[in-house]
Image (tube, grey):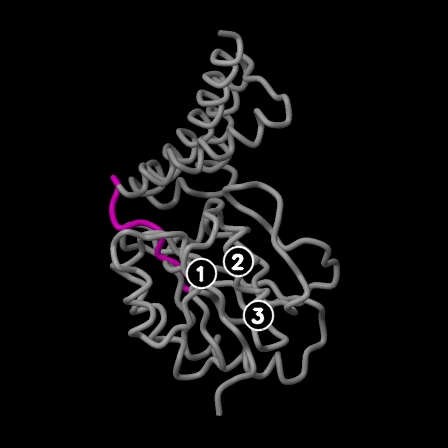
Amino acid sequence: MPAPLTVVIPTLNEASQIADCVRGLVAWAGEVIVVDAGSKDGTAAAATAAGARVLDGAAPGIAAQRNAGIAAAKHEWVFALDADERIGPDLAGELAAVVAAPRHEAYRVKRRNVFHGHVLRRGHWGRDWVVRLFKRDRRFGGPTAHPGLQGVTDFGALSHELNHTPYRDLRHHLDKLITYSRMSADDLAAGGRRASWSDLTLRPAARFWREYLVHGSVFDGRLGVIHAGISAVGVFLKYAFLWERGEQRGA
């Protein structure tokens, strides 16, 4: 019997992976909703064919898309999933058990992050907990690039991991890094923040050494150097884009 749980997935041009994502859910989840923000690559059709209910033409933005799906959910409990994440059999079984007898208002899950074919157990990817299971009266908000569930203080923790493969290759990684850096810069600019000299120089350097030494990426060899370096580049780009916003305002 399917678990009384709605899985909500925001998408934008995810035709290459949305069908695989949905097929892994329809066998056990009571409802799968894909909230598509006007994809041009056939994402909506692929999701429908795989068995999802599709809300097409939603306003773009992770929080807005998730919230639209949550509002349309028929089950009391909702799991917020991304197209590059997969729920394995162990986590699926745990989710079914939790929603049948919940003890908390919401639950967080640790992501098992695969970075260029390797599972990362160090750096910030190795400590990646996200709140994804909750009741449908909750909504997402906060930073544009990484919104969080709002208004919940009573969290439980799931024991099984959520599989996450965020990047196809290094180019895809950098493309997403630029997109998220722009979003973060826009959020800072909207709050009146301007980029300082230390933002552009000290913050990226501090991020590299924290990831590489403090959080243990040094033990991942060359992959660890790449991981820490890209993390530092992301910080630099965020403040470089923020500097650009300031220049544009000044002009």
Cα–Cα gap, marks 2 and 3? 10 Å
Q: Of the numbered discs in the image, which one, if any, rests on residue 233?
A: none
Q: Which residues are magenta?
A: 163-171
154 sits left or right of 165 in the view = right
Q: Give, as a three-letter code, the residue at label 1.
A: Val
Residue at figure coordinates x 47%, y 29% from the top left: 235
Residue at figure coordinates x 62%, y 79% from the top left: 99
Query: Is disc 1 in contact with disc 2, using a CB cutoff of under 8 Å?
Result: yes
Question: Residue 180, image x and y in percent?
Answer: 44, 38
Q: Count numbered badges in the picture.
A: 3
Q: Residues within 10 Å of mark 1 (few under 14, many from 20)?
A: many
Compared with residue 167, is residue 222 higher up or lower down, i.e. above or below? above
Residue 166 magenta-drawn? yes
Question: Residue 82, image x and y in percent?
Answer: 43, 59
| Element marked by disc 1 | strand
Q: Earlier in the sequence, mark 2 or mark 3?
A: 2
Query: Is disc 2 in contact with disc 3, using a CB cutoff of under 8 Å?
Result: no
Residue at figure coordinates x 45%, y 62% from the top left: 9
Compared with residue 19, is residue 36 higher up or lower down, i.e. above or below? above
Q: Which residue is mark 1?
A: 35
Residue at figure coordinates x 54%, y 17% from the top left: 195
Q: Give, as a three-letter code, the residue at label 2.
A: Arg
| Element marked by disc 3 | strand
Cα–Cα gap, marks 1 and 3? 14 Å
| Element marked by disc 2 | helix
26 sits left or right of 6 in the view = left
Q: Which residue is mark 3?
A: 78
Q: Residues within 10 Å of mark 2 (few under 14, many from 20)?
A: many
Question: Residue 65, image x and y in percent?
Answer: 50, 55
Q: Earlier in the sequence, mark 1 or mark 2?
A: 1
Q: Which residue is mark 2?
A: 66
